[in-house]
Image (tube, rainbow, N blue to C red):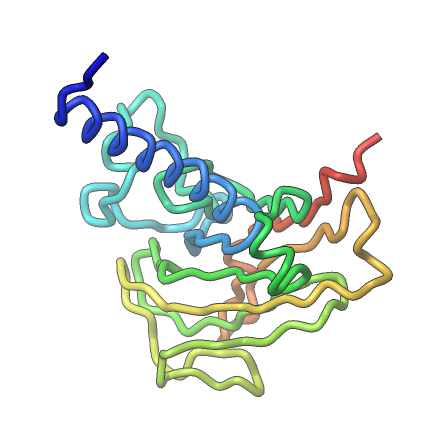
Amino acid sequence: MKYRPWVLFFTAGLLTILAGRWAMSLIVTSEYVHFSANFPTYEGAEVLSRDKVGGPWSMLPDREWNAYPAGGVMVWGRQGAISFDVGRQSFLKRLAQPWDLTLATYWIRNVGSRPRRVRLDLDMCGMPVEWVTFESDWNNNSKTTTRDILPGKTFAMDWHVHVPPERRNQEVVCSGGLKIMDVKTDKLLTFLPIEIINSEQEK
């Protein structure tokens, strides 16, 4: 039985798309988590209207709108917390960099109504963390921005986390989080929970 060329082309294209989506689903939950973080998100904060900020929240009906979430995976995905599963890493990742994880965001976003300079505090349960950013307005010693982040604007940051041997066989590798603080007042603007788990250790 002969197959028409377009059938083979269509099938190959579909398999490529499915494989890509499967690989991406692993990457964003187990190897390289790219997320958004909004500030301020505390109760009573003065924030911009959704039409000025844009993003997924601008499309929500008013009855479903409550407040800006602390953050979420891939901006358009799950909101409110970050979960990393090292038990779902791909074969290549396990071979090359099995215990080096990356957290990244281009969207530390000021959803408030006034400019703010912020300090970032990342709690990764004492595990070694490398801070990397292309932003020039950053003090790595104090972990603070050296410019005001204007309403609706963003700041970028990457963190490279190394999981030490003593934590690798735990079901919950780390239950930590990202704090975004106001430099002038030291007020907590946002807390975004970040959890690293190892599903291979689940009972």
Find the residue positioned furthest to the top: 1
Report the residue at 36% width, 68% height from top. Answer: 155
Q: Is residue 137 left or right of residue 31?
A: left
Quadrant of image for the C terminus: top right
Q: Is residue 61 above or below residue 196?
A: above
Quadrant of image for the N terminus: top left
Q: Is residue 191 visible in this depiction of the protein?
A: no
Q: Is residue 65 left or right of residue 73?
A: left
Report the residue at 71% width, 45% height from top. Answer: 197
Q: In this view, does 32 lie to the left or right of 77?
A: right
* Residue 179, quarter of the rendered image: bottom right
Report the residue at 36% width, 79% height from top. Answer: 135
* Residue 114, quarter of the rendered image: bottom left
Q: In this view, does 180 lie above or below 16?
A: below
Q: Which of 31 and 103 is in front in this view?
A: 31
Q: Is residue 136 visible in this depiction of the protein?
A: yes
Where residue 138 appears, as percent x and y from the top left, is 43, 83
Q: Nearer the viewer, residue 47 or 52?
A: 52
Where residue 44 appears, as percent x and y from the top left, is 45, 45
Q: Is residue 180 above or below residue 143?
A: above
Q: Is residue 11 above or below residue 120?
A: above
Q: Which of 172 and 38 is in front in this view?
A: 172
Where residue 113 appears, as percent x and y from the top left, is 30, 57
Where residue 16 appears, as percent x and y from the top left, is 32, 37
Report the residue at 60% width, 64% height from top. Answer: 96
So how many labels did they put on this image? 0
